[in-house]
Amino acid sequence: MEAHEIIKRPLHTEKSVVDIQETNTYHFEVDRKANKAWVRNAIETLYPEVKVVSVRTMRTPGKIRRRGWMRGKTPEVKKALVTIRSGDSIDIGY
């Protein structure tokens, strides 16, 4: 897999903004088949000036949502929390 296929998008939530400011940890949505080594290599490929210290991954299951009688399911998502070396930063647009 290519680096841009592994890293789908950065996640922008209140928690992710606090983690960036306090612990230099960035949140990304990643491909469901990606492992920690793939995520580390993809981040260091996409952002060559950054050195990754640690990667934590988690899978969030899809939830059933209803709208009247219709039922649907949200997609399952895999997230990665990437901690980078202090002093480094990733410009992700916010």
Image: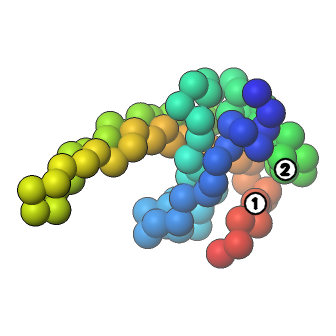
Question: Which kind of residue does numbered mark 2 sit on?
Answer: Tyr
Residue at 56% in and 52% down: 27
- Sequence-first tag of 2 and 1: 2
The relative height of residue 90 versus residue 62 in the rendered view (above or below) is below
Closer to us: 85 or 63 = 63
In this view, the residue farthest toward the right is: 48
* Picture coordinates of residue 56, whole percent (x, y): 53, 35
In the rendering, which numbered label is found on residue 8?
none
* Picture coordinates of residue 93, whole percent (x, y): 70, 72
Give SS at disc 1: loop
Dots 2, 1 in contact, CB < 8 A: yes
In this view, the residue farthest toward the left is: 69
In the rendering, which numbered label is found on residue 90?
1
Closer to us: 37 or 23 = 37
The relative height of residue 72 versus residue 41 in the rendered view (above or below) is below
Residue at 58% in and 67% down: 21
Q: Residue at label 2?
A: 47
* Picture coordinates of residue 74, whole percent (x, y): 33, 48
Question: Which kind of residue does numbered mark 1 sit on?
Answer: Ile
Closer to us: 1 or 90 = 1
Rendered image quadrant of residue 36: top right
| Disc 1: CA contacts within 10 A as few (<14), some (14-19) or many (>=20) | some
Count the marks: how many?
A: 2
Left or right side of 26 for 46? right
Rendered image quadrant of residue 54: top right
